[in-house]
């Protein structure tokens, strides 16, 4: 029997497609505008004439950023931070969420530990005490000052905990009968069926590390150790002084460069890596948690 969708179903599909297309356009247009402004001339950008296409096409803003040693160095620091921070964050989330996902009969102190972690979401130590701890542990002006203070994101841990608790107990029982220990259960059973949660939490972690800028100013004594976002946040402030110190040839090369074009260029370049990562993890968002893992 051939399925024939009803009129209401057809209308729903059409309206759903239109709404989603409209939402997609709303999300894409600002980035197109940023790119257009960053590629436009100083006059057009400052006059507000640029919409979705560049006017007076120029790459001066990207040349200015890309040829600066400070920019390349800060980009390297950010990449190092994202890689190390994400690996450490995800590992701590896994090994913390797994035991807390057990029933009280298996882990008697589970509730106490859950509340211990949950309280930290609402009550923080404060900026000054945190800085004093980081300083006393010798982390100031090192990459670890950007990673270790927030190494365990409790909110992500709770999300992973709840995800683990939804995994069928039959899978764990079957693996236990075959002789699997807790490490085997975590790495061979729980994590493989948790790809949607891992992708979501991993993306949040990557975005958090990439967009963070204030801790770079707080914990880094040398601008050479600044991550990209911290460097970019200080770039506009120092731009006017730098422009006054360049020679005639440099001024001619940067004649189309302005605060607005540089600002839009840095925003676009700051968002571009995340935009490139998202398509690789997006497909996991719509997957079922244990599709095909438990069979009758």
Image (cartoon, helix red, strand yellow):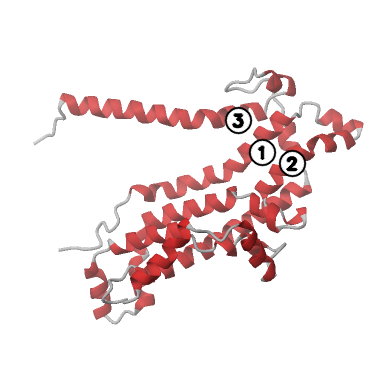
On residue 235, the disc is 2
Residue of label 1: 266
Residue under the image location 72 percent in, 34 percent down: 61
Element at label 3: helix
Q: Nearer the viewer, residue 262 or 178?
A: 262
| CB under 8 Å between discs 1 and 3 | no
Residue under the image location 39 percent in, 65 percent down: 115
Select label 2 or label 1 by which is in front.
2
Residue 114: image quadrant is bottom left
Q: Residues within 10 Å of mark 2 (few under 14, many from 20)?
A: some
- Left or right: 177 with respect to 48? left
On residue 183, the disc is none
User: Which residue lies most toward the right here?
Assistant: 247
Residue of label 3: 34
Q: What is the CA distance from the residue labelled 2 to the residue labelled 3?
A: 18 Å
- Left or right: 53 with respect to 181? right
């Amino acid at each position: 029997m051939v399925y024939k969708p009803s009129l209401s179903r057809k209308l729903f599909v059409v309206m759903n497609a239109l709404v989603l297309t409209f939402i997609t356009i709303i999300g894409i247009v600002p980035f197109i505008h940023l790119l257009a402004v960053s590629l436009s001339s100083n006059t057009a950008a400052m006059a507000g004439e640029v919409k979705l296409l560049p006017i007076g096409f120029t790459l001066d803003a990207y040349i200015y950023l890309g040829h600066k040693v400070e920019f390349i160095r800060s980009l390297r620091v950010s990449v190092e931070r994202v890689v190390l921070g994400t690996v450490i964050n995800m590992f701590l989330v896994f090994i913390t969420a797994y035991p807390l996902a057990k029933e009280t009969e298996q882990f008697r102190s589970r509730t106490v530990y859950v509340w211990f972690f949950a309280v930290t979401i609402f009550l923080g130590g404060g900026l000054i005490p945190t800085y004093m701890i980081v300083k006393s542990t010798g982390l100031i002006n090192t990459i670890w000052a950007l990673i270790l203070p927030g190494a365990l994101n409790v909110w992500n841990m709770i999300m992973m905990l709840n995800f683990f608790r939804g995994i069928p107990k039959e899978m764990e029982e079957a693996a236990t009968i075959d002789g699997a220990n807790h490490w085997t259960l975590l790495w061979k059973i729980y994590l493989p069926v948790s790809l949607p949660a891992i992708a979501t939490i991993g993306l949040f972690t990557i975005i958090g590390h990439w967009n963070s800028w204030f801790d770079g100013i707080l914990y880094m004594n040398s601008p050479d150790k600044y991550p990209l976002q911290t460097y970019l946040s200080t770039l506009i402030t120092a731009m006017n002084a730098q422009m006054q110190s360049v020679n005639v040839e440099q001024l001619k090369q940067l004649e189309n460069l302005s605060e607005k074009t540089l600002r839009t260029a840095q925003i676009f370049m700051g968002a571009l890596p995340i935009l490139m990562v998202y398509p690789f993890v997006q497909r996991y968002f719509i997957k079922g948690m244990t599709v095909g893992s438990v069979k009758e």
